[in-house]
Amino acid sequence: MKTIKRLKPYLKGSGWLFALSLLCAFLATGSKLAIPFFAGRAVNKIIDPSSSSMEFGDYLIVMSVCLAVGTIFRYVFDYLTAMIGQRVILKIRTAVFKSYNDAPLSYIDQCRKGDMISRLINDVENIQAGLVSGFAALYDGVVAICFTLVFMFTLNWLLAVIVVVLTPISIVVSKLVSNFNSTNFKAQAKDAGILTSFALEGVNNSEAVATLNISQKREEEFDKLNQSFRNAVFKANLGSSLINPSTRLVNAIINGVLIAVGAILVINSKNTVDPFNYGVSVFMIGDLSAFLTYAASYMTPFNEISNVITEISYATSSLKRVDDVVNAPKDVNDGSKAIDGEVDNLKAEHVTFSYDGKRTIIKDLDLEIFKGHKVAFVGPTGCGKTTLINLLMRFYDPQEGNFSANGYSTIELEKRAFRNHIGMVLQDTWIFHGTVFENIAYSKPEATLEEVKSAAEKAQASSFIERLPKGYDTYISDSSGLSIGEKQLICVARVMLMEPEIVILDEATSNIDVRTEALLSESFNALMKGKTSLVVAHRLSTIKSSDLIVVLKDGEIIEMGNHNELMEKGGFYNSLYNSQFN
Amino acid sequence: MKNVAVKPVKKYSWRLCAGPAFKLFEVACELIIPFLTKTIIDEFIPSGDMRKTLIYGAIILGLGFFSFFMTMISQYYASRVACDYGYDMKKAVYHKISTLSEKQLDTYGKQKAVTLVNNDTFSLQNAVHMFMRLIFRPPFLIGGAMVMSFIISPYAGIIFSIIMVLCSIVVALLFIFTPKKYAEIQSSLDDINLVASDSLKGARPVRAFNKQEFVEEQFNKATTAYEKKNLGMAALNSILNPATFCFIHLGIVLVVYLGDLSISGASVISTGSIVTLISYLVSSFAALMMFSRMIVALNKARASLKRINQFLLMEPDITNNPEGEPCDSDEYIKFDHVSFSYSDTSAKNTLNDINISIKKDQWIGFIGGTGSGKSTVISLLERMYQVKEGTIYYRGLPIDKYDLDKLRQEISLVSQKPSVFKGTVKSNLVLAKDDATDEEIEWALKQSLAYEYISKYPDYTDHEIEENGANLSGGQRQRLLIARGLLKGGDLLILDDSTSALDYLSDLHVRENISSIPGLTKIIVSQRAGSLKDCDMIYVFDKGEIVGAGTHTELLENCKIYREIYDMQRSQ
């Protein structure tokens, strides 16, 4: 039930298709099952020409019609099922992806990326195979069972009762096995996720693995995970492969009983008029033949259903895994207010923050930034510079205190509208799979090629871009062989193109050589002219001209002022600055 | 093409045959039962012999139980072999990943390689499982039923054969057309994978630039393409069920017709035979459906098989073949007219005619712009790539003759790429040295200044590190990595731009600490001229060439580019 509830939103809009496919299954299966009935009657006609008023040839015609109807509707049903399955897949994938997109960064930073991808790819496939195709097979099976029951009771109620009483055994057996097995499948899916994450990590850090000379060690660790996965799969496999033979055994028993009892009924029906036939007037060989076919096909859907149950149990745990991420926390406290015009002032009041609730990264920090100022953050590594940017961008929210813009707390502001005021280059470069043009125009999709080119020029990226095989149309990705410095230049070009109202540079040039950086600084100066800018840099030369330099240490502001003031003060900044050329 | 991916299967020799062999007993039982039924209908019912009817009924029951036990034995071996095979394949693929060079992995695609480990091996394993459990049943059953039909009557045999041939044609046609479509679907799935991992990695920029709609649109495009390809496949696959249904039931109609037919006064087939033949047709139909389902699944696996096979057949271009003895010459490392290019086809070299000489215990600096070739020289020294021209000598021996494991053990590289693994501080550190003591770890942390922040963790070195060190800042990561490099205790320490996220003061302290370690040769790659001032020798790189070599003072005098870099840093 829970499963259906979880699946329901994704089936929306496919309702009429679903109804149509149910109708097709009904017609296809119905005609298919009518054929043995008429075949039996035809056999009766051969044995005893007086057994019915229909001609033998009429039976052949009726059977042929059933054949045609069955063939056509079977095709439509199969295709429709696949179609519904694809629609559902599309909806689920979109929902999962959307949920990843809407999730707060604290959630994404915590999750294993391999596992997140595995849910999006593998688990969704499982759901299609198990819950959509599986459900269709289930329905088809149920229709087949109903039709078979009708025909069997028409032929002989006693034999029909035998079949109906004995078959549940096969359902009970398969149900027991699959229940027992669902934990095994869960264990298997979990192990698979761990294994994938491990492999992904190794591959992404393959250079480190080679240079640390630990490939052997990594292989041994992988081997352990691999073994545990093998054991999990073996259990799940063996469990699921028990279902089929068990139901088949039950079927064989029923078949044996039917043949014996059926034969006796035919003999009795022939020998006597009616002392021992429990109201069954005539039961001929043709009827027995039809009955045996039904008894056999009555069991087939149960077999199919039991097959499907394996996939359904697999899919159910996948659906749960998918549902977990679809219901991942959403980025909350999205305020409703927006800033009219430009941001005139940014303020941090008593901000305290910790990532894990244990170690405080920012301690009771107060700061005010005015429009048009260039503010630099310096301090030893780990002093909280990047965290401060994370908080300002509202990637994370502080535990205490708050940021405000133009007097509004940033929590009251609509996140996206607020971010629109800001353009940033981050320490960790990010390139997505797409052309160079697309990567730069990321910040401004309507940009022309000319604009992109001029942005790249300002970012000192044009010379290496033009050397790429197809220039701006070259496809690049995170692993396509660009150096970190080159990637950083592309990220810089994005901001050059965007010309944001507030510029944030978080170690934006840390991997760019000094000569290029010197050329870049002119472009940066032009970009930041008259704009508010926040710069995190360890090369103090780049921030000397700032209006305000904020020196942070252990999450607290220890010094503040412009370059000259701080140098005169002879404090931490002074020693930091002098150390550059030592 | 050699099929290496199938090779491990041979290892399971007898277990591999055990599955199908026991399956054979199961099929035999299934074929005998309809024949027993025929005897009951044709002989015992007309004669009214209840006793014999019951005996035959009991035999049919017995055969059911026998068949069950045979199947279970077969299933057990199938699961065992399939899981062992999956395990072997995963191991082989993972091993291959670790032997291939960086260049080969990049060319192949790292994401794709991981898909091999998790997806393709699993679908192959399932294929083996299915193959052993199910693939032999349908041919055994259909073949057996055909023989039985001919025994009943040649006409019946002919009808049965024609029907089966028609069905097989449909199945065969699908077998030919689906693999290509399936490969397309798979590559479409890779696209979805790529977009998703891009936007997960870029979670910050996506949000910073308010690009949620853009990535969603990209994702939509990928998923819609995937849907379209799948529907094309479905249109084809959906032919199977109705076509086979049509043929089999046509067979039933014909058999019934045959029952009414008599040639020269005698019936062609008995009524019992009609029942038996219908039963054979129906069970053959079921078997064929099973077979067709398997084909779809095996087809999926065939694409995987091909991919794994190609991957396993790749020859690692960096191999370990030690030869000759290293001599204890004074010259530790020498680059002799070395040229190199990342691409085999491009005419432009990344490195051109590089000559470097490094003596023991020297402190060497590399400086130059982005893309000038500094890091490439380091990669060549680690034998991540093969040189194009010239020779690198290491301890007097051409580097490709030197034991690769030893080489990498002796070099402690702190790369500019922050490779931190999920685990703890300690688990990351001991990657460099298994048996590092707490004192050694503390020493290394103190030298790299990582101690400053790690000592503040309440759980100290047991502090958890997230995937890719996501919970560390850039500078924290770098200091941790330097500690790891120091802990490794090689003879040569390389810091490849690995203090770029450190402030100048920390950078200076780290360098001071390192210089006090005795018996260590050091190569520092840096953008900062200031960091290299005290080096015994500085090499200046520009556009893949060395444009200057000497001490700081020498270079200031006679290397224009060096002077430029230095002046720029000073003046700013």
Image: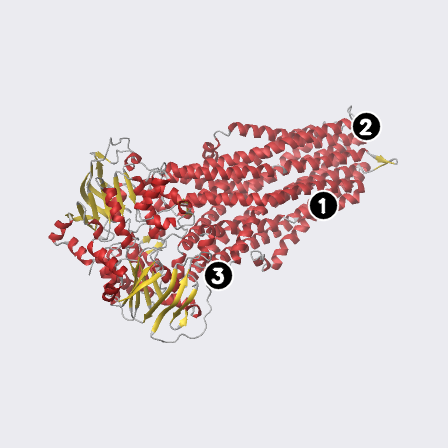
Q: Secondary structure at mark 2?
A: loop
Could you classify mark 2 by the number of other residues whose Cα lies within 10 Å: few (under 14), some (14-19), or many (20 or more)? Answer: some
Across and down, in percent, residue B116 comes to 49, 51
Which amino acid, mark 1? Leu
Q: Which residue is mark 2?
A: A49
On screen, residue B58 versus residue A396, left or right, reads right
Q: Which residue is mark 3?
A: B316
Across and down, in percent, residue B246 comes to 68, 35
Q: Chain of mark 2?
A: A
Distance of label 1 from label 3 (alpha carbons): 53 Å
Identified at 67% across, 38% down, the residue is: B244
| Residue B196 drawn above or below residue A282 | below
Across and down, in percent, residue A498 comes to 31, 39
Q: Chain of mark 3?
A: B
Identified at 66% across, 54% down, the residue is: B21
N-term mark: 1 or 3: 1
Q: Which residue is mark 1?
A: B31
Residue that protrudes farthest toward the right in the picture: B264
Which amino acid, mark 3? Pro
